[in-house]
Amino acid sequence: MTWSRRFDYDHNCDAVHATFTDCVLVERKDVERWEREVSRRLATFGRKVDLLIDLGGLVVKPAVSAAFGEARSRVLSRYSLRSFRYGADRTTRTSIFTSAAIHGVDANVYESRDAAIAALLEARKRG
């Protein structure tokens, strides 16, 4: 499966912006690859970061939703302070909300990048 991902530091909001293109997680090996690649890239920042995640190019199929939830939880606990998402399709959004409830992590899914940034900035104010 060919997919791409980018992790760019956004100086304006002091967060790492993650984008995915054609990243469809169908089998467990896809989830393992996703976790490996995302972990490798986030480790390069050398510290835990705030994340803005564009989910428009990430699709989590129901068959791997539980595995994705576990992988997502591990990645977030290792590499992020806070994470805010936007642009998910219905299936991926459901997977994220379900894994958030199971693993006790925030879902933080918003309709747009601007809404996700506003939520991030508000979270910082609250401490």
Image (spheres, rainbow, N blue to C red):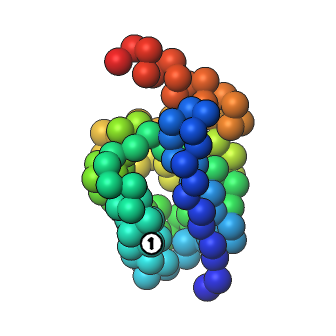
18 or 103: nearer the viewer: 18
Which amino acid, mark 1?
Answer: Glu
The relative height of residue 27 versus residue 81 in the rendered view (above or below) is below
From the image, tell me which residue sits under label 1: 37
Residue farthest to the bottom, as pictured? 1
Asked if residue 109 shows in the view, the reply is: no
Relative placement, left or right, of 21 versus 35 is right
User: From this viewpoint, which residue is outermost toward the front?
Assistant: 11
Q: Residue at x 43, y 82 (%)?
A: 29
Q: Position of residue 91 (x, y in %)?
A: 62, 55
- Above or below: residue 17 compared with residue 58: above
Residue 6 in the image: state x and y as whole percent: 60, 63
Q: Is 127 on the left or on the right of 62, as rendered?
A: left
Residue located at (55% from left, 58% from top): 7
Left or right of 16? Residue 66 is left
Query: Residue at the spot x=39%, y=55% of the render?
Result: 45
In what element is the residue under mark 1? Answer: helix
Comparing 31 with 41, the one in front is 41
**Figure label count:** 1
Q: Quadrant of the C terminus?
A: top left
Residue 89 seen in the figure: yes
Find residue 50 and report its image quarter. Answer: top left
| Rendered location of residue 51, percent (x, y) | 49, 44
Q: Image quadrant for the N terminus?
A: bottom right
Residue at left offset 63%, top offset 72%:
4
Q: Nearer the viewer, residue 32 or 78?
A: 78
Q: Residues within 10 Å of mark 1 (few under 14, many from 20)?
A: some
